[in-house]
Image (cartoon, rainbow, N blue to C red):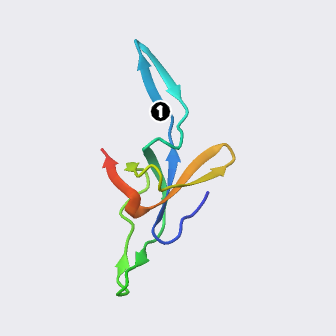
Amino acid sequence: MIKPLRDYVVLEKLPEEKKIGSILVAKPADKDSAVAKVVAVGPGTTDEKGKEVKVIAKVGQMVVFKKYSTTDYEDGDKKYLIIQDKDIIAVVE
């Protein structure tokens, strides 16, 4: 598993589902997907005054993120996105 540094977060791409009539069709997630699951978070960073700034995202959360702020990473058949914590814009509850 990949371990992020500073204020970076690792997201797992999830399959998107679409319902057609009574049939649920899953399609693979792609880069344009804006919802993913947090699988790892970095320890945080420090601001310009030396104050510790922790990562807000928590492992296991479903989050909405800025679509074009990610770096793709593959580990075998799993696809991950690496993103800075500041580019996560909402938590799905």
State whether residue 83 appears in this view: yes
Task: Name the residue: 41% across, 12% down.
Answer: 22
Q: Nearer the viewer, residue 17 or 68?
A: 68
Task: Name the residue: 61% across, 53% down.
Answer: 73
> Where the N terminus falls, by quadrant?
bottom right
Q: Using the image, determine if residue 52 lies above or below residue 36.
A: below
Task: Name the residue: 64% across, 50% down.
Answer: 74
Q: Using the image, determine if residue 42 lies above or below residue 35.
A: below
Label 1 neighbour load within 10 Å: few <14, some 14-19, many 20+: few
Residue 85, percent from left and from top: 41, 62
Residue 7, percent from left and from top: 45, 68
Task: Give the side of residue 47 with respect to residue 24, left or right.
Answer: left
Quarter of the image for residue 53 reads: bottom left
State whether residue 62 appears in this view: no
The amino acid sitting under disc 1 is Glu
Q: Which residue is situated farthest in the left direction here?
A: 93
| Residue designated by label 1 | 16
Total residue callouts: 1
Q: Which residue is situated farthest in the bottom direction here?
A: 49
Q: Which residue is situated farthest in the top direction here?
A: 21
Task: Give the side of residue 93 with respect to residue 44, left or right.
Answer: left
Q: Which residue is situated farthest in the front direction here?
A: 68
Residue 63, percent from left and from top: 38, 49
Residue 48, percent from left and from top: 37, 84
Task: Name the residue: 42% across, 44% down.
Answer: 34
As helix, strand or loop, the secondary structure at mark 1 comes to strand
> Where the C terminus falls, by quadrant?
top left
